[in-house]
Amino acid sequence: MLQMKLCGDLILREKCEPVTEITPDVLDIMNEMVEMMRAQNGVGLAAPQVGQLKRFLVMMDPDTETVFKMINPQIITRSSDTCTIEEGCLSVLGSDNLPVYANVTRPASVDVTWTDETGNQVGAKMSGLPARIVQHETDHLDGILFIDYLSPVRREMVMRKVRKHK
């Protein structure tokens, strides 16, 4: 059974290694991640959040409820236009055991490629919430948290809430 890693766990700051072989173990972990994501009302979960230092993630388009299982995802292009939306993270929890939220500015759309669970190469242009989610989750694969995009003052406000959780 996988365990959620929380803010402060150093694994969340590690850069993940590419997946070289799609094994039954990788597929089982991804399936369990989908269940964890749904159980916690999340829309995305990256491998390091469950203690795996491999480049894979799961995410859901909240509008269509389509689930994407992405192995070795890469954002190829990012739009120059941006949008600011409130973000939270299942690894950044406050004292109420719920995600802490803050406004983050990111590109409004991205082109992303990945390998799906059957080994096929897939590509998509994503905008709106799917673009936001895939950027947030691929950041996890590089050891980046959404709080890294905040001003020092705003980051400290978020971290005070996180410290109360511990």
Image (spheres, rainbow, N blue to C red):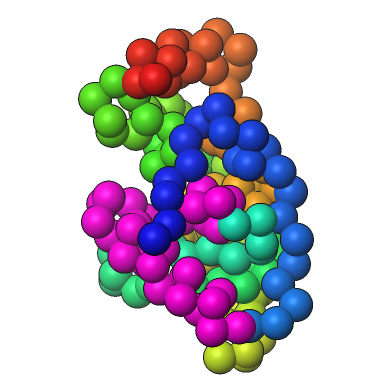
Which of 127 and 22 lies nearest the eye of the viewer? 22
Q: 154 or 71: which is nearer to us?
A: 71
Does residue 43 appear to the left or right of 126 in the view shown?
left
Q: Quadrant of the C terminus?
A: top left
Identify the image quadrant of residue 101: top left
Q: Name the quadrant containing residue 98.
A: top left
* Position of 103 relative to 111 (above/below): above
Indicate yes or no whether the magenta region holds residue 24.
yes
Where does the image place residue 38, in percent across and percent down from the top left?
28, 60
Q: Is residue 111 magenta?
A: no
For the stretch drawn in magenta, the main secondary structure is: helix
The quadrant in which the N terminus is found is: bottom left
Please give the name of the residue rendered at 39% of the width and 42% of the height, measured from the top-left corner.
Answer: 90
For the point 40% across and 73% down, the residue is: 31
Q: How many marks?
A: 0
- For the record, the magenta segment spans 23-51
Q: Quadrant of residue 2?
A: bottom left
Above/below status of 124 relative to 147? below
Judged from this view, the residue extending furthest toward the front is 1
In this orientation, does residue 73 appear? yes
Q: With respect to residue 140, does 8 lie above or below?
A: above
Is residue 81 among the parts visible in the rendering?
Answer: no
Name which residue lies at 54% across and 17% down: 155
**Residue plotted at (48% across, 69% down):** 29
- Indicate whether 96 appears above or below 160: below
Q: Where is residue 45? Give x, y as percent.
A: 46, 55
x, y (%) of residue 103? 45, 29
Q: Position of residue 26 (x, y in %)?
A: 56, 75
